[in-house]
Amino acid sequence: MEGNNLDAAIESLLNVEKQYRLAGDVAGTRKAAVDIVELCFKDSNWKTLNDQIVVLSKRRGQLKQAITAVVQKAMEYIDVTPDVDTRIELIKTLSSVAAGKIYVEIERARLIKRLAKIKEEQGKIDEAADLMQEVAVETFGSMAKTEKIAFILEQVRLCLDRQDFVRAQILSRKISPRVFDADTTKEKKKAKEGDNMVQEAPAEIPSLLELKRIYYELMIRYYSHNNDYLEICRCYKSIYEIPSIKDDQSKWIPVLRKICWYLVLAPHDPMQSSLLNATLEDKNLAEIPNFKLLLKQLVTMEVIQWTKLWEFFKDEYENEKNLLGGALGTKAAEDLKLRIIEHNILVVSKYYSRITLKRIADLLCLSLQEAEKHLSDMVNSKALIAKIDRPMGIVSFRTAQDSNGVLNSWASNLEKLLDLVEKSCHQIHKETMIHKAVLKA
């Protein structure tokens, strides 16, 4: 058959394929269809190959096993195409054939991923991102878990590259962080029907722990856009817990440094305090004593002198600046100073119930206007409870009460009021009786 003209050979094979198809012979139809694809490839006739793939897929009553075999066979030839245009044309043909067919949904997802990669290499990030978003791999039952995660992470990365942070967040929520702690060996490989079995992920797909690292690195990029320091810190904390990182000192020291920096930069709240205390208990912190000292200063309820702190940690900060990100450097320095001021105000509120605004400004090394502004911001954010008497220049602090405490104090006050009312009634009644007795006498 190789000696005959290509068109004649294809025509002959198409007749054979028709006979097998009408007879319902799955193996024969699949073999004939694959032979046609191989014939076009051996002749290096890529246009005919694309045409025949479409023809085979559109034949009346075509068996899905034959279409699957054709698509899978043609996918093997993508890497050996002579140029990029031919490769793109073949991928588009296969993608259009696989569109809407649930039995080749995984092949279509892989094709779209390869096409998006080509577009990205050409500098067309927007086109690549739009292509990837067409595919909802989370609905694919037969795709391996690691391949699904890798695909979604690629979607998130492309969205971040095009500065589409809203869609990146929506896509990232399709992955639950708990999935990285699951045991992949227990994933079901066999099912009652062969078509529904979970396929094994390709060799180039990273392991689950590697995907965990990629996921949190992408989330750090997302949170860095909003300067959400606490979430960035939590992401680094999760990376720090990965065994491959924790077992290698050269890898975990930079991560632990970042955890410390972002903890200090994060606004004060219960989650931040909990993470701060948990990090201080880490034995590895002894390897970076400067950062241990920094965290201890934040935990200790003493006023921190900003100038002394900045002199001591300026070199460390400059070293980390390029790792924190270029544009973030100046903003992070301002936020660091703000966090120290907030810490100092919290310290003052612990030791004083009433204090003059001038004294607060002296303790914080700020002007009266700055001290009042920072105090007002903390009250607005409910970090503390305080009232400022501006004419007198006095600040009154009080501890926060939960709903039960408020109800208990209200009930106690009401009880005292009723006691006073009862005593008053008793006194009035007593006076009335005495007055009546005097009149009778």
Image (cartoon, rainbow, N blue to C red):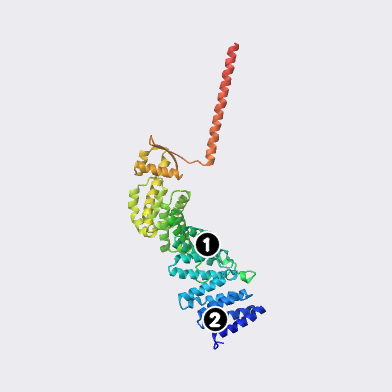
The image position of residue 111, as x and y in percent, is: 52, 71
Instruction: Give the residue drawn at x 37%, y 43%.
Output: 371
Q: Do the residues labelled 2 and 1 touch (CB within 8 Å)?
A: no
Which quadrant would the N terminus be assigned to in this image? bottom right
Name the element at disc 2. Answer: helix
120 versus 16 height, above or below:
above
**Residue nearer the viewer, 11 or 236:** 11
The amino acid type found where label 2 is placed reads: Glu
| Quadrant assignment, res 372 | top left
* Res 370 quadrant in image: top left
How many residues crowd around disc 1 within 10 Å: few (fewer than 14), some, or many (20 or more)?
some
In the displayed image of the protein, which residue is found farthest to the top? Answer: 441
User: Is residue 413 placed above or below 228 in the rendered structure?
Assistant: above
At a point 63% along the width and 80% down the height, the residue shown is: 18
- At label 2, counting other C-alpha atoms closer than 10 Å, the crowd grade (few under 14, some 14-19, many 20 or more) is some
Q: Residue at x 45, y 56 (%)?
A: 223
Horizontal relation, residue 296 to residue 138: left or right: left
The residue that appears at 57% across and 15% down in the rendered structure is 435
* Residue identifier under label 1: 180
Judged left or right of residue 20, residue 331 is left
In this rendering, position of residue 231 left or right of residue 290: right
User: How far across and how far down the image is residue 249, in percent?
Assistant: 42, 62
Residue 200 in view of the camera: no
Which badge, 2 or 1, is on the more N-terminal residue? Answer: 2
User: Can residue 17 be seen by looking at this rendering?
Assistant: yes
* Residue 427 in picture, x, y percent from top left: 56, 22
Looking at the image, residue 79 sits to the left or right of residue 195; the answer is left
- Where is residue 129 drawn, in percent x and y? 48, 65
Residue carrying label 2: 38
In front: 117, or 46? 46
